[in-house]
Amino acid sequence: MNNLFFILLTFLPFLVMGQEHMDVAHEGHHEKVHHTKDIIEIITTGIRAKPFGEGEAIWGTEAHLTYWFVHAYGTGFSYTLRSEEGELLNDIALLASWNPNNWLTLNVGPNFALPNNHREFALLAYAEAEINFRLREWFHIGPVVGTLLGKHSEYSLGLHLGFEIHNPALKHK
């Protein structure tokens, strides 16, 4: 419960503040959400995941590949790799992504926990929020908070780096 309280206190100010306070890029570099489509986004995230209830927190890494087909909606997949007691844990998630504004991305979808010697296959619900500090039109960085709900429920915190590949021929001005 203390961890959940800490998470809320850490990220609530970011969610309350408006776009004008969150965006560190100069005016005119807000095109992904409001003026463009057909963008491929690659994100890498370092995470610290902890099971709800008992269990040790473990480090991991996550990679997203998202195709933004309209200004605020995209789809893609996520691959997560964690190591627990010398055993590699592999997860794949299918993502539906939404940018309600330029500084926030929400991802949801089914997560497939792949089996190994100590874990059987499991289907979980995946949900994640990313705060995006835009340093360039094509680059953002920020905190991530997420959860997996199901047989192996956990929450995670992390830091992401996001890279966007824009197609200039499709850009709307």
Image: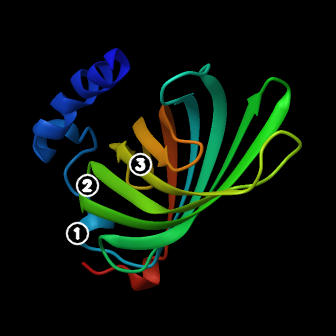
Q: Which image quarter is the N terminus in? A: top left
The amino acid type, in three-letter code, at marker 3 is Glu
The amino acid type, in three-letter code, at marker 2 is Asn
User: Label 1 crowding class (10 Å Cα cut-off): few <14, some 14-19, many 20+?
Assistant: some
Q: Is 41 located above or below residue 152 in the figure?
A: below
Q: CA distance from mark 1 to mark 3?
A: 22 Å
Which residue sits furthest bottom? 169
Q: Could you say which quadrant of the image residue 140 lies in?
A: top left
Residue drawn at (45%, 43%) of the image: 147
Say if mark 1 contacts mark 2, CB within 8 Å.
yes
Provide the residue designation for mark 2. 102
On residue 34, which mark appears?
1
The amino acid type, in three-letter code, at marker 1 is His
User: Label 2 crowding class (10 Å Cα cut-off): few <14, some 14-19, many 20+?
Assistant: many
Residue drawn at (64%, 25%) of the image: 58
Provide the residue designation for mark 3. 128
